[in-house]
Amino acid sequence: MRLTTMALMVLLSVGSGPASAQNAEWTEPFPPFRIAGNLYYVGSKGLANYLITTPQGHILINSDLEANVPLIRASVEKLGFKFNDIKVLLISHAHWDHNAASATIIKATSAKYMVMDGDVSVVESGGKTDFQYGNTPSNLYPPTKVDRVLHDGDEVKLGDAVLTARLTPGHTKGCTTWTMKVTEGGKSYNVVIVGSPNVNPGYKLVKNTEYPTIAEDYQRMFTVLRSLPCDIFLGAHGDYFGLNAKYPRLTTRGPNPFVDPEGYKRFVSDRDEAFRAELAKQKAGGEKPGLK
Ligand SMILES: [Zn+2]
């Protein structure tokens, strides 16, 4: 019985990895809320979406799976905004859990789709040119035309909102970390929305013919992440920054739990360490010990 349970747990832990098509928390509703200033959380429990509002319309980060679109719409409306006022759609990176529903959202809102250059072909091929998942049918989605190709450091402006796209590659070739400033109570805060620092199961960091520079790109990403000033720490999934633990601590009085510069530093160090360990393991595995 115990062995069976353990075997099941192993199976579940493999199945719940980023390579699986589904994860129950991805489509589990989460209350929408204002993080700070004009920045709102409109995601599910497992997939993060951010709405940046302006009098000239709104910016949405991530479209998620098709099943998330009604949840995102309901969250935007519950906050008192109009879904149709979304003018710009951005993504954290070109993986189906963050961008499969982009075509649907663009059709509903006429939003302009702006994507980092390294992810453009993946988005426009519906996931087929992805170095890791391009041949996995469950990870493909409707091809979506990109209106503006972004490069590292480019700004996306709408009304008084300015977001900066930082190329943080490795997890995907165009993985994007978004930064912006928000003002709350007369104070300005640096926001960082991490694209993804994770090495997925099955990723080849050594001799990857589909992505020869993957290891250097991860290293470049960690250098960029460490260089970013961060007060408000966010990311593509709630579990990066402890959404479930922080949300109940958000009150109108007292410190904002999402202001967490130390948590950001710890997260970046922890992920960098995990990357280095995996790289060392793969390098060692690729050599034949004892043979020259
Ligand atoms: Zn991903």
Image: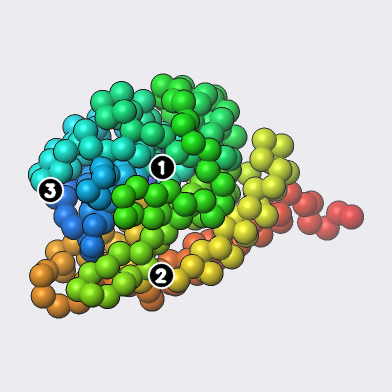
Dot label at residue 230? 2
Q: In the image, is 28 to the left or to the right of 91?
A: left
Residue indicated by mark 1? 91
Cα separation, mark 3 vs mark 2, equals 26 Å
Cα separation, mark 3 vs mark 1, equals 21 Å
Q: Amino acid at mark 2?
A: Cys
Ligand 1 closer than 8 Å to the CB at disc 2? no
Report crowding for label 3: few under 14, some 14 to 19, many 20 or more residues within 10 A (C-alpha): some
Task: Name the spot of residue 23 as percent of width and height, x first.
Answer: 31, 39
Image quadrant containing the C terminus: bottom right
- Which callout, 3 or 1, points at the residue further toward the start of the chain? 3
Residue indicated by mark 3? 79
Task: Name the spot of residue 181 as percent of width and height, x first.
Answer: 35, 64
Task: Name the spot of residue 280 as percent of width and height, x first.
Answer: 66, 59
Figure quadrant of residue 135: top right
Figure quadrant of residue 142: top left
Q: Is residue 106 above or below residue 256?
A: above
- Which callout, 3 or 2, points at the residue further toward the start of the chain? 3
- Which callout, 1 or 2, points at the residue further toward the start of the chain? 1
Report crowding for label 2: few under 14, some 14 to 19, many 20 or more residues within 10 A (C-alpha): many
> What residue is shown at x 14% (from left), y 78% (from top)?
254
Report crowding for label 1: few under 14, some 14 to 19, many 20 or more residues within 10 A (C-alpha): many
> What residue is shown at x 43% (from left), y 48% (from top)?
156
> What residue is shown at x 16% (from left), y 55% (from top)?
33
Colour scheme employed for the rendering of this structure? rainbow
Q: Is residue 267 above or below residue 128?
A: below
Image quadrant containing the N terminus: top left
